[in-house]
Image: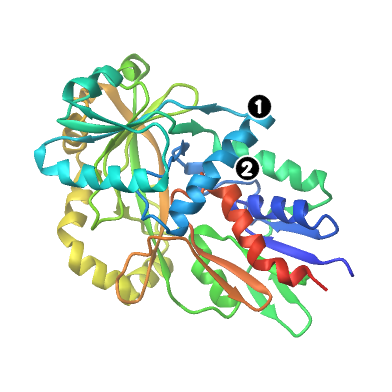
Amino acid sequence: MSTQRVGIVGGGILGLAIGRRITELFPDTEVTVLEKEGALAQHQTGHNSGVVHAGLYYAPGSLKATLCRRGVDLLKEYTQEKGLPYEECGKLVIAVDDSERGALENIWNRASENGVPGIVKMDAAQLREVEPHAAGVAAIHSPFTAITDYVAVSQAYAEDIVKAGGTIHLNFPVDGINQTATGVEVSSGQQRLTFDRLVLCAGLQSDTVARWAGDDAGPAIVPFRGEYFRLTPEATGLCKGLIYPVPDPNYPFLGVHFTKRVGGAVDVGPNAVLAFAREGYTRGKIRPRELAQALAWPGFRKLAAKHWKMGIEEMAGSVSKRLYLKRAQAYVPEVKAADLVPAPAGVRAQALDRDGSLVDDFRISVLDRVTAVRNAPSPAATSSLAIAEYVTEQMRDQFVG
């Protein structure tokens, strides 16, 4: 069998995990990762919360649920093997009042069906034994929910690829893809590379890149910026692990929560506001063409019509620290304005179908010689090694014969 040449577009955690898995399964394959930036893991991976999710929320039987549970075990083993940070600091999902008890029970049922280990129901007194400064009427405690450093994990994946003989091209912004009868040509300016197979893991640019390969316009990516504060070092004792709200099942964003980070810092947030650029990590970053694309997508207009009140509330929290603080105090009443300092923001690649439906589960397209990861929201980083198994299994027949 002749040597297969496989290209991976995207040097985030998923592209690197898939490249690494291909080198494991098919050691004679030439793997080349193409990353537009001058370093790896610069976008969603590098702005990740660092949480290793246990699988509490996801619909049983969904790819999210299945690959998250598999991914947790694989990631924990991998970080131990490589000596990377992995701390099981635990998570509390808190109902702040009686109106949230039903939704909390639904999370319990999902978590139980997904096989999340060690979960415990807690009343108000019990939850304060876990998080002494937290408030609420009831909670679910997930003691094995963990935190890690996903940039360090990504670098380790990259090192595995290179050790296996693969290549990583930085500063290679892909601007065209052309499938032929014998291969896939990838262009970056005047540079051309040809592969037998191509995997697209382009994150915030996933819809654009997939269309170049011949895929449908939808789902389209609409970027939402998540803005964070961080507790001052003097206030980090207010949170020992992860303190999360009960999510609104009709809305894709969790709302303000407290997240311990590797190294001991505690982030508070995020909110969720429309970003005016795909990589709009600051309010001043505006790319008119990308903003126009988001606003023109029929799915976004339908989403905005349905959730405009929530959108206004999120924008209000973006400009008012007082309002942001009030939301945080619902879970940790002792936190004060002086305890919050600005922290780096992230951008979520929210996939929207044409009818306005939020694409919740992982979505992967196969386009002859091209495999496109069209939607990989949280818990994609947690699930990275399991997603790599899944994608390469879909590609297995392409390496036979």
Report which quarter residue 104 is drawn in.
top left
In the picture provided, is 162 more to the left or to the right than 172?
A: right
Q: Secondary structure at mark 2?
A: helix
Frontmost of labels 2 and 1 is 1
* Percent position of residue 299, x then y: 31, 73
In three-dimensional space, the C-alpha distance between marks 2 and 1, rounded to whole angstroms, equals 13 Å
Residue located at (20% from left, 22% from top): 336
Work out whether 206 lies above or below 23.
below
* Percent position of residue 354, x then y: 35, 76
Residue located at (44% from left, 28% from top): 261
Residue position marked by numbered label 2 in the rendering: 154
Task: Name the kind of residue labelled 1 in the image.
Answer: Gly
Residue 200 appears in the figure: yes
In the picture provided, is 221 more to the left or to the right than 139?
A: right
Model colouring: rainbow
* Percent position of residue 6, x then y: 75, 64
Picture quarter with the N terminus? bottom right
Work out whether 246 lies above or below 25.
above
Q: Secondary structure at mark 1?
A: loop
